Image: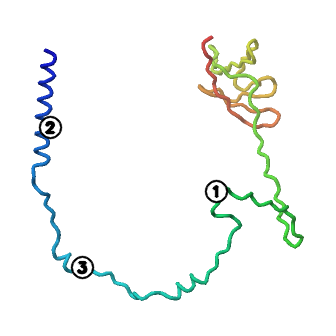
């Protein structure tokens, strides 16, 4: 039974191959159309001076090959040239001395981590919560100082503004979310 199915499939595939071959190679020659007028009347290029430029040929013949020191038939590169020491010429003008760029003062970051804020139930002032390590927690109101070095100016929902007391520079600290223990 299995052999009969295989023979049937083979016969079907051979018929399919014959049908494809018949439609693909049906015996007709491809039709090529060409413009007969273009082949009989060619369009020539317009050249102003078709004569040989002998001056350029003579110039090329008179040039001599000057080697750069490398054997063109060798695959290996020559060693790099030895650098000469840079000796300043006393006749050269000296470059102008450029003063260093001014140092822009930056505020130092808070020594404690800002991890939350809240409000006092009987007042409108916000308080910020800071953590210094694992054990020490600071609770500071707006306008108060943190560690006698930083004054808390404004406590927002995602950040707070502070001022360094000694220099008067201002900075911003971003609320850092606590991960699950």
**Which one is earlier in the sequence, the residue at label 3 or at label 1?**
3
Locate residue 10: give its quadrant.
top left
Mark 3: give few (<14), some (14-19) or many (20+) Cα within 10 Å.
few
Q: Give above or below for 100 relative to 73.
A: above
Q: Are marks 1 and 2 in contact (CB under 8 Å)?
A: no
Q: In this view, does 84 lie to the left or right of 123?
A: right
Relative side of 39 to 133, left or right: left
Of residues 110 and 23, the one drawn nearer to the viewer in this rendering:
23
SS for callout 3 = loop
Q: Dot 2: what SS?
A: helix
What separation in Å lies between label 3 and label 1 (alpha carbons)? 50 Å
Cα gap from disc 3 to disc 2, whole angstroms? 47 Å
Residue 16 on image: x %, y %:
12, 35
**Pointer 3: what residue?**
42
N-terminal of the pair, mark 1 or mark 2, is: 2
Q: Where is residue 36 in the image (x, y as percent from the top left)?
A: 15, 74
Q: Mark 2 points at which residue?
A: 17
Q: Give the spatial CA distance, label 1 vs label 2.
A: 56 Å
Q: Which quadrant of the view contains residue 181?
A: top right
Tell me how many marks there are. 3
Residue 67 versus residue 106 in the image, above or below:
below
Q: Where is residue 65 in the image (x, y as percent from the top left)?
A: 64, 75
Residue at point 10%, 34% (across, down) = 15
Instruction: Name the residue nearer the viewer: 35 or 165.
Output: 35
Tag 1 residue:
75
Describe the element under mark 1 as helix, strand or loop. loop
> Looking at the picture, does residue 13 appear above or below residue 82?
above
Q: Pointer 2: residues within 10 angstroms few (<14), some, or many (20+)? A: few
Residue at the image position 79 percent from the left and 50 percent from the top: 102
Q: Residues within 10 Å of mark 1 (few under 14, many from 20)?
A: few
Marks 3,1: beta carbons within 8 A: no
Quadrant in which the N terminus is drawn: top left
């Amino acid at each position: 039974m299995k052999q009969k199915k295989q023979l049937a499939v083979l016969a079907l595939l051979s018929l399919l191959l014959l049908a494809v071959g018949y439609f693909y190679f049906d015996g007709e020659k491809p039709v090529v159309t060409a413009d007969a007028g273009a082949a009989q009347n060619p369009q020539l290029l317009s050249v102003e001076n078709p004569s040989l430029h002998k001056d350029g040929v003579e110039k090329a013949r008179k040039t001599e090959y000057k080697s750069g020191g490398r054997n063109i038939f060798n695959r290996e590169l020559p060693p790099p040239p030895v650098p000469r020491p840079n000796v300043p010429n006393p006749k050269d003008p000296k470059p102008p001395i450029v003063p260093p760029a001014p140092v822009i003062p930056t505020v130092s970051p808070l020594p404690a981590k800002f991890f939350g804020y809240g409000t006092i139930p009987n007042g409108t002032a916000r308080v910020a919560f800071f953590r210094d390590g694992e054990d020490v927690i600071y609770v500071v109101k707006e306008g108060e100082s943190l560690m006698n070095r930083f004054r808390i100016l404004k406590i927002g929902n995602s950040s707070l503004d502070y001022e360094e007391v000694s220099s008067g520079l201002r900075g911003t600290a971003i609320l850092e979310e606590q991960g699950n223990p």
